[in-house]
Amino acid sequence: LRRLTQRQSMQQANINGMPQCLRKTAGDSLVVCCAYDGSDISMRALELSQLFVRKDDQVLAFFCTIPGADSREGERIGHSAEAVARKLVLPNFKFELLEASSVDKFSNVIVDRADKRKAGLICTGTRHTVEGGKRALGRQTDPLVRSSHVPVAVFRPGQRKVDHNRYIVAIDGSMQTLSAVQFVLSMAQSTDEVVIVTLTDDAPKGEADLQLAAAVAAQTRSNVQTVGTRRVPRDPAVALGADLCQTVSKLEGDFLVLATGWKRWDELGSI
C-alpha cells in the first residue's frame, strides 16, 4: 500500500501538464473541429460532435484541398457541411476550406488550424477501407491522432448519438493512460458508464494498475455515477489491438478511450 501511494503521487505529479478535461472550468466555451470531406462517415462525425458541445460552443468543419484542385469541389463540400449543420442545429457553425501541399499533409494542416482556432477537440471518421482512394479521411486518421495536441474523437460507421454511453478506458499503468481516465470522467455525463480495463496476464501488476486508476478516478471531479474496473487476461492468439477490440465488444462498449502520442511510447501507445 505504501508503494502504491508513492507511485500514485509520482503519477499524479506527472499528469498535471496533460489535457485532463475538455473545459478548464464548467463555464468555459469549447471549440470543436471536424474533419469533413462530404462522405457519410464525415457526416456521422459532424453529427456526433453534438455529444461534446453546448449552445455557447463553436463547431468548425475543415475540408482540405491541394493546389490546382477544382474549386467547385470545395464549394460543394462547404454546401454539404452547412446543410448537415442546419439539420443538426449545431451552435456557431462555420466551414473552412484549407489547402495542403499534398494529400499526405492534410493531417498537419488540420492540426495547425485547430491550434490556431484554440480547439479543445478534433472529431473525425474512419473506416476499414478508403473508397477507391477518393476519400482522404481513412488514411489521415492515424497521423491526425498521433500529431494532434488535443484529444481526437474517431467515429466508425453505424455509431449513433444516444443518451447513455459506455466508455471503455484502456490503461497500462502509465501516466498518459491515467490522464485518459481523468479526461473521460470529466467529459462523460451522469447517465454514462465508465469501465477501466487492463489487458494483462500479470495479475499483481494488473490489479495494482486498476487500484491506481480507481484512486485517480476517485480524486477526479465528475458527474459519472457508475465507474467500474476489469482485468482481462490477454489472448496470446491475437494482437493486442485486436484483443482490445474484442474486449470492447464483449463489454458492449460504445467508445474506446486510448492515450497515445506522448513523449514516452508504451504498449498501448504503440497500437
Image (cartoon, rainbow, N blue to C red):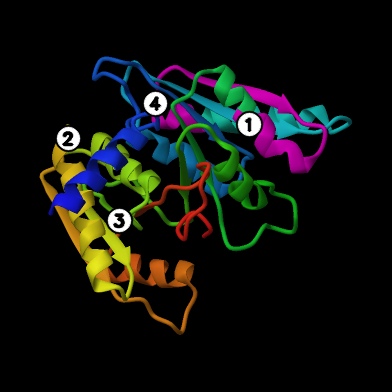
Q: Position of residue 139 (x, y in %)?
A: 66, 52
Labels 4 and 3: the sequence-earlier one? 4
Q: CA distance from mark 4 to mark 1?
A: 24 Å
Q: Secondary structure at mark 3?
A: strand
Secondary structure state at the residue bearing disc 1: helix
Residue type at the position of mark 3: Ile
User: Element type at marker 4?
Assistant: loop
User: Mark 1 or mark 3, which has the lower sequence index?
Assistant: 1
> Left or right: where does residue 157 sit relative to residue 116?
left
Q: Which residue is mark 4?
A: 89
Mark 1 touches mark 2? (CB < 8 Å): no
Query: What residue is shown with label 1?
Result: 110
Who's the residue at 53% across and 47% down the image?
125
Is 104 in the magenta? yes
Q: Amino acid at mark 1?
A: Ile
Residue 219: image quadrant is top left
Q: Amino acid at mark 2?
A: Ser
Q: Which residue is mark 2?
A: 222
Tag 4 near tag 1, CB within 8 Å? no
Q: Earlier in the sequence, mark 2 or mark 3?
A: 3
Residue at image x 20%, y 52%? 3
Q: Which mark identifies residue 168?
A: 3
- In the displayed orientation, state which residue is furthest to the right: 68
Q: Give me the residue at 17% from left, 35% from top.
A: 222
Report x, y in % for residue 249.
Answer: 33, 68
Horizontal placement of 14 versus 37: left or right? left
Where residue 104 sits in the image (x, y, percent)?
76, 43
